[in-house]
Amino acid sequence: MRLEGKTAIVTGGASGFGEGIVRKFLAEGAKVMIADINGEKAAALAGELACYACAVDVSDKASVQGMALAAEKTFGVPDIVVNNAGITHLPQVLEEVTEEDFDRVFAVNCKSVYLTARAFVPGMKERGSGAILNMASTAGVSPRPRLNWYNASKGWMITATKAMAVELAPLGIRVNALNPVAGETPLLASFMGEDTPEMRARFLSTIPMGRFSTPADMGNAACFLCSDEASMVTGVCMEVDGGRCI
């Protein structure tokens, strides 16, 4: 029960890594709000797990403000905010990614962190405590060809995490990130371009431990970084990647 008495919002929490984090946080005693653009899926999972749900587009200011209001009514300023929601463009040469896809990747992967900071950091400052966890990627450390602008968005996330951490540390707010390798999530097929045994084998060949990241892997790592056990840890971008970035 490492998160007993804590409250948390997990964006993109209705599936994939986000769902793994939600399940772990609940198992460790936290009260959790699942925030997801798929409101029906979030509500269904919340019903299964006996927690809260909120439909949100993390790239939209008004929608994020609505999420913050829902959280305020549910349990006040959250102790933990997990910026997990993210998307990618399909693998292709950098100059052929459409402007629409580029804008959407940066809106969901980057602007969302700015918007949630605007929504929740003031309350955390007033309280004098809080933990923010951003979902970055090994793509921001060791970029893969043809995932060019996605790579860049995750590099942004890593720098944003460190910038937030150094500014907010004196105010009692810790900010960390996770760098997963590709995992068994709805985005896997998009990363690979096509989900075939041959393409999976190519991806797995770059991971020394020989397997993809799992939602449970992310849940375990997120639980540590957001718990009081990590009270001296901030600005860390933890690679949970089976050795991919060595």
Image (cartoon, rainbow, N blue to C red):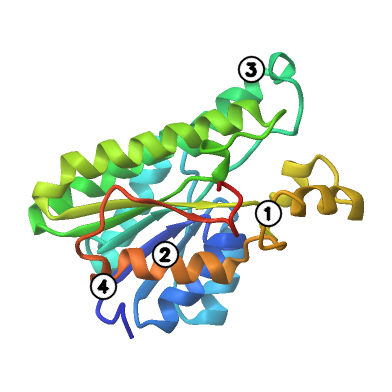
> Which residue is painted at 52% across and 49% down in the image?
85
Q: Distance of mark 1 from mark 4, alpha carbons?
A: 29 Å
Above or below, comparing residue 169 to residue 71 in the picture: above
Q: Name the residue type under label 4.
A: Glu
Q: Distance of mark 3 from mark 1, alpha carbons?
A: 31 Å
- Which residue matches tag 4? 229
- Which residue matches tag 1? 207
Q: Is residue 56 left or right of residue 144?
A: left
Q: Name the residue type under label 2.
A: Ala
Q: Is residue 129 left or right of residue 179?
A: left
Q: Distance of mark 4 from mark 2, alpha carbons?
A: 12 Å
- Position of residue 227 measured from the top left corner of the image (x, y, whole percent): 29, 70
Report whether residue 118 is seen.
no
Q: Nearer the viewer, mark 3 or mark 4?
A: 4
Q: Which comes before the other along the chain, label 1 or label 4?
A: 1
Q: Secondary structure at mark 4?
A: helix
What number is the disc on residue 215?
none
> Which residue is painted at 69% across and 49% down in the image?
187
- Which residue matches tag 3? 99
> Which residue is painted at 81% across and 39% down in the image?
193
Report whether residue 66 is seen.
yes
Q: Secondary structure at mark 2?
A: helix
Q: Distance of mark 2 from mark 3, alpha carbons?
A: 33 Å
Q: Nearer the viewer, mark 4 or mark 2?
A: 4
The reply to whether callout 2 and callout 3 are in contact (CB within 8 Å) is: no
What number is the disc on residue 222?
2
* Figure disc tally: 4
Q: Can you tell which quarter of the image residue 197 is in? A: bottom right
